[in-house]
Image (spheres, helix red, strand yellow):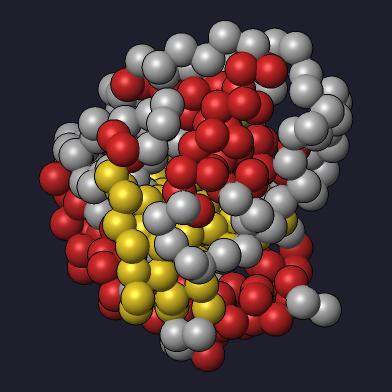
């Protein structure tokens, strides 16, 4: 898939959104993107419709292990949601605009609040493996921005403000829910790198110095595109491994997936409890 210009992107997003909405009677206002090893949440939705990414016009395909590659529309309790089981990454060869394209599709579907999740390496040594951390800010070291190219005002302004990328009130909701579920309430700064190689110990020391608590290879292009479109964003990292050099052992993707499976119960409980409160916030 090659997205040439902003008119092309807008038209393609409209077409993809129309196709998805034609497959279901649900009209969700909350979307979720599930990262590596966290896709099981979508399997528990009621009245669900599952659409493989390959069937959605010009939608990028997910090739990473642990990403099912389908859009699931259903209900979590009484809350209708659109859930992406897996995402595209820059390291798969996509541009930042292509990585952000699904978020633009969600926006054209009527999504107003977006919950982004990911598997991340823990730089902050106060986090334990399996910690669920609310992202309060990010550092973009991927060298790309999904808003590069001619701007289309139908998406958002040329120079969108990123001061409040991650909605404070959503973080407060999630932290409050975490406490009630006996999940240690954590916040942190996420740094996005290109990947796919894991970071070196020297790079992790550098990232810690510039203020990063978590490191990963996703989320930031989606968050930028979402804020450009006026969506409110909540982002949650699962610390699936400690970053390079924190522990004296090599990193591997199987550990990421295994930790995701281990904390899945807590993760699902957190999301299920957060959703009604975000839904209530949308109608205030």
Residue in the image at 32% along x and 50% along y = 51
Query: Where is residue 220 drawn, in percent x and y?
Result: 57, 36
Quick check: 202 above or below 28?
above
Residue in the image at 84% along x and 37% along y = 161
Query: Where is residue 123 drawn, in percent x and y?
Result: 45, 44
**What is the quadrant of the C terminus in the image?**
bottom right
Quick check: 164 above or below 155?
below
**What is the quadrant of the N terminus in the image?**
top left
Q: Nearer the viewer, residue 259 or 269?
A: 269
> Which image quarter: residue 67?
top left
Residue found farthest to the bottom: 180
Count of numbered tags: 0
Quick check: 123 above or below 34?
above
State whether residue 124 appears in this view: no
Side of 24 where 256 appears, left or right: left
Q: Nearer the viewer, residue 11 or 221?
A: 11
Q: Nearer the viewer, residue 135 or 233?
A: 233
Side of 202 where 140 appears, left or right: right
Residue found farthest to the front: 22
State whether residue 78 appears in this view: yes
Query: Where is residue 75 drawn, in percent x and y?
Result: 43, 76
Query: Where is residue 226 drawn, in percent x and y?
Result: 66, 43
Residue in the image at 42% along x and 26% along y = 58
Residue in the image at 14% along x and 45% along y = 254
> Which image quarter: residue 61?
top left
Quick check: 30 above or below 163?
below
């Amino acid at each position: 898939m090659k997205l040439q210009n902003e008119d092309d992107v807008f038209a393609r997003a409209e077409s993809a959104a129309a196709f998805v909405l034609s497959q279901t009677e649900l009209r969700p206002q909350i979307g979720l993107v599930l990262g590596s090893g966290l896709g099981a949440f979508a399997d528990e939705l009621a009245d669900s419709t599952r659409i493989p990414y390959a069937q959605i016009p010009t939608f990028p395909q997910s090739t990473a292990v642990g990403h099912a590659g389908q859009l699931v529309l259903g209900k979590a309790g009484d809350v209708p949601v659109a859930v992406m089981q897996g995402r595209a990454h820059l390291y798969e060869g996509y541009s930042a605009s292509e990585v952000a394209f699904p978020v633009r599709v969600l926006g054209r579907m009527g999504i107003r609040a977006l919950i982004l999740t990911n598997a991340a390496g823990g730089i902050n040594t106060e986090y334990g493996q399996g910690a669920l951390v609310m992202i309060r800010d990010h550092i973009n070291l991927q060298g790309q921005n999904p808003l590069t190219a001619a701007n289309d005002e139908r998406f958002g302004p040329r120079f969108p403000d990123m001061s409040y990328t991650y909605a404070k009130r959503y973080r407060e909701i999630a932290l409050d829910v975490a406490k009630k579920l006996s999940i240690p309430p954590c916040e942190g700064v996420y740094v996005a790198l290109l990947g796919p190689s894991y970071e070196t110990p020297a790079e992790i020391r550098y990232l810690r110095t510039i203020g990063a608590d978590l490191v990963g290879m996703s989320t930031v292009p989606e968050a930028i595109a979402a804020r450009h479109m006026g969506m409110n964003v909540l982002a949650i990292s699962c610390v699936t491994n400690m970053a390079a050099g924190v522990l004296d052992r090599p990193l591997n993707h199987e550990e990421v997936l295994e930790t995701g499976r281990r904390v899945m119960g807590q993760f699902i409980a957190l999301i299920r409890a957060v959703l009604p409160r975000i839904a209530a916030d949308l109608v205030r």
